[in-house]
Amino acid sequence: MYFILPGILRKPWLLAASYFFYMCWRPEYVLLILFSTVATYAAGLVIEKYPKHKKTALAAVIIMNLAVLFFFKYFDFALSNLNSVLSKLHIQAVSKPFDLLLPVGISFYTFQSLGYAVDVYRGDIKAERNFLDYALFVSFFPQLVAGPIERSGSLLKQVKESSKKRLWTYDGIVSGLGLMLWGYFMKMCIADRVSILVDTVFNNVHAIGTVEAAAGAAGFSLQIYADFAGYSAIAIGAARMMGFSLMENFNAPYFAQSIAEFWHRWHISLSTWFRDYVYIPLGGNRKGRIRKYINLMITFLTSGLWHGASWCYVFWGGLHGLYQIIGDILKPVREKLLDMFRVDRETFSFRLGRCFITCLLAGFAWIFFRAGSMKLAFEYVKRMVTRFDPWVLFDESMFKWGLDRREMGILFMGILLILAVSVIREVKKIDIGIFLMKQNLWFRWVVYIFLITAVLVWGEYGVDFDSAQFIYFNF
Amino acid sequence: MRKAVRVISFILITLLWLAGVYEVLRWKDTHGDYISSVTELKETPENTVDVVFVGSSHVYAGIYPSYMWSDWGISAFDLSISGMDRDSAYYYMKHMFKTQSPKVAVVDVFPLTFDRHEHIGNVYRNYLSLPLSEDTLPQLKAYAAKDESVSANLADYISRWPIIHTRYKELTVKDFDLDAPNYFARGEYLNWEGEPTWLFRPEEVSPVVFSDDQQKWLDDLRSLCAENDCKLVFMALPFHAYDNDQYYIDHAAIYAEENDIPMFDFNRMSDELELDPETDFFDEGHLNAYGAKKVSRYMAQWLDDNYDLPDHRGDEAYAVWDQDLKYYEHRRDGDAMAASNDIYEFLPIMLRLDDTASVISLSGEYEAEKYSMLTDYGLSEEDIRNGGIWLLKDQVIYPIDGYYIEELDKYSTLKIENGSVMINRSVYAANDEGLAITVYDRFLNKTLAYKQF
């Protein structure tokens, strides 16, 4: 419909489609996105019109939006923590007054609309006057439920242009479709497949040894990447088909050579959001080393909490903050050791080693992200370092972790493909959709048909399969 | 314009490719052995089936159309699927009437004894074996009304892909190249194995009443057969019936009598047919070939006595029934050879089977006199004394010296080298002591027997 409608109707159609999409899950929660939209839209106008009160307006809209987010996402968490303190003080616990279901995508659209309010406050953009344009910016369906968290300077501008000229092109549609196909492949053939192994390991922490634990952590590192990067590819591809350009969200993150670089490549739209709207306003690295470390910890602990209402996520964020602080502190020692042993920093092996260590650190942190509770996470780590069981690599035990030989084979092939696509991204600096678009017709078609067939045949879906949701839908 | 052509070409190529993939992945059996009575029906020339037997595994295990063909020339067909339920029976008959116009439809009333499938595999077998048609949705709605797992996944059932795509885990050569009996067999499941069982026959008159659905099913069958000018007959093949099961069958007999429909309850007629629970059953639910022979012959005689069923033997249009008979004979003889340890019993069977290649090998230390009967099959006494390897094909025997290789059919290659006999990667005789015989059946595309005497 979008492609055949006249320009004037395209935006209303997209807006209606976006709201319909959101309401498909729980219609009443549409009020939340509407509230966030109206509040930040009005705040933008007030900030611009009354510069003297812009601080108050910004503070008010931030508090209002975060209050809604807190209520729906963190209330239960806060209450359970309060009750655990009360129980230690032998005071009667506060009973839970109601059950809440986390609204899909609330963390994403709340941050996107707050980013807009801050941009207007800083004078980076003008306040949007057209409410429909703004509402579409907040609710644009391809990225509504799990990002990328767009910036007003980019998406809002494109929304405004969409009625004036035709944004889509043949190449955009084809490369968008290619990117979407790759996203479905990552999600349905890789993430959902490796999740079977990961679930088996994490649901049997009492029975795992070193190798299973390492495989579970590595598996989850792959799962969450294939899941979230897959979703992002689908979102970016769908938007590209309609002529909208969304920001890149993943850039071969496991090729990073440090944790700091990892965060330049992983969930880029969120990490840059935290950089621009939390870390830099806190002073960034401009106020001395200690303050920089404090700012880093605040940013990463908040980022952890953004991912979920659990101490596991906070710990995970904290670990990433700590990695960077320790890395920074140890940098002179590291450099000295490298000089002492005359290690050539320009070699592939050196970069590979750094990349490997970064993956190990990120993989270790993922244990806390996945475990479900701190107790289980520590039990997991304990078993990983105390139950050395290398024989499981040779006695076929690994094929009892939920995936048989055939499934392991498919998974292995999927990993090789992810590796190949990551190399393409690294070398060519373009995504797989655009890369394929630039190839000869026969090659493109073979890849498209392979991906379609792989998703339809090897995808984990259907009557006998309880396909996992996209993990980030929960955030 | 160029872009439009490109897009259309891509879509067409992709659809063609996916159709090929679907053909490989699609559900292919009704019996659990890669043979589908629906495919067999599709391969049957139009309007050649005179009698159709409809029902579950009881039917494919208990009615062998080959018995009816060999002695009466009746062109019968088993339209049977494991666990065939009431809705399936109705829709499979509807499907059959699109290409066939049988004079008699004999329906097993066993589906009256259950409402929903116990095994999901039987839901798949019953639903996925039928091609998509205008009846698919009504059939699915009927299933969904009785089975929550179907109603909860209706979209998956309609599109079929979400169900069949996981078959990539179990693909075999038969998914790429259909097993030969699909092209000619008549729906039966041939089986000579058996285990003793016993039949339970309550004495009381049925105290049950039919539910609306059961009643409707019987009424619908009557209407469907009347619309297609086909005589309806009910039967219940013998099985170990529990109280309720037998009560529903008894109640069906009352319904049949009220509506002037012939009905055969073989559970209650087992004495009349001299069915022996010790030898005539494969298990407590199914007859084997010996029991099927008694029931099939009884039904053939009754059908021949009561309906105008022409003898089609010798008619080219009915060649599939000849092939089915040949299939039956090869399976029967193969089974007999595999079970036999008596060379005097084994050799005549081997000789009478056409389309076979048998390798006879005499090696090592042995008493030549023990194998003197081989002179009747073309070997000289000197041959028997000296030993060697011979190939028996089309009742002619050839000596094999040194290295020999022959493609037996498109699946199998025979290699004889240094006294060892190999068919594909299986070694059947490697300088055994005495006589070893390997019989390969080119009609069934498999090794029938490997015996040492």
Image (tube, coloured by chain):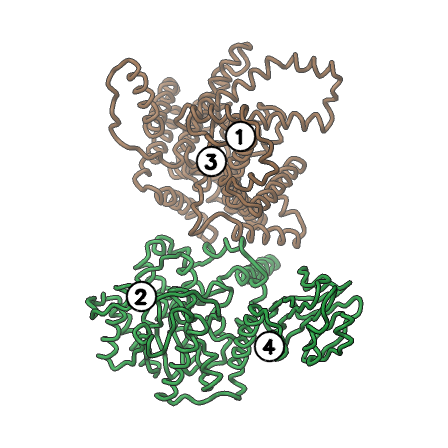
Chain colours: A brown, B green
Spot occupied by residue A61 in the image (x, y as percentages of width and height): 36, 25
- In the rendered structure, are the residues bearing label 2 and label 1 in contact, judged by CB atoms less than 8 Å apart? no
**Callout 1 secondary element:** loop
Is A356 in front, or is B364? B364
Q: Assess disc 1: are there few (<14), some (14-19) or many (≥20) residues with their C-alpha within 10 Å of its C-alpha.
A: many
Q: CA distance from mark 2 to mark 1?
A: 52 Å
Q: Position of residue A21 (x, y in %)?
A: 39, 44
Q: Is residue A307 left or right of residue B418?
A: left
Q: Earlier in the sequence, mark 4 or mark 2?
A: 2
State whether residue B73 is above or below residue A254.
Answer: below
The residues bearing labels 1 and 3 have C-alpha atoms spaced at a distance of 36 Å
Image quarter (top left, top right, bottom left or bottom right) of the C terminus of chain A: top left
> Which amino acid type is marked by label 1?
Gly
Please give the residue where the numbered disc 1 appears in the rendered image: A209
Residue under label 3:
A147
Tag of residue B241: 2
In what element is the residue under mark 2?
Answer: loop
Residue A435 placement (x, y as % from top left)? 63, 44
At label 3, which amino acid type do we have?
A: Gly
Residue B349 circle label: 4
x, y percent for residue A374: 43, 24
User: Which residue is at 64% across, 74% downward?
Assistant: B356
| Quadrant in the picture for residue B373 | bottom right
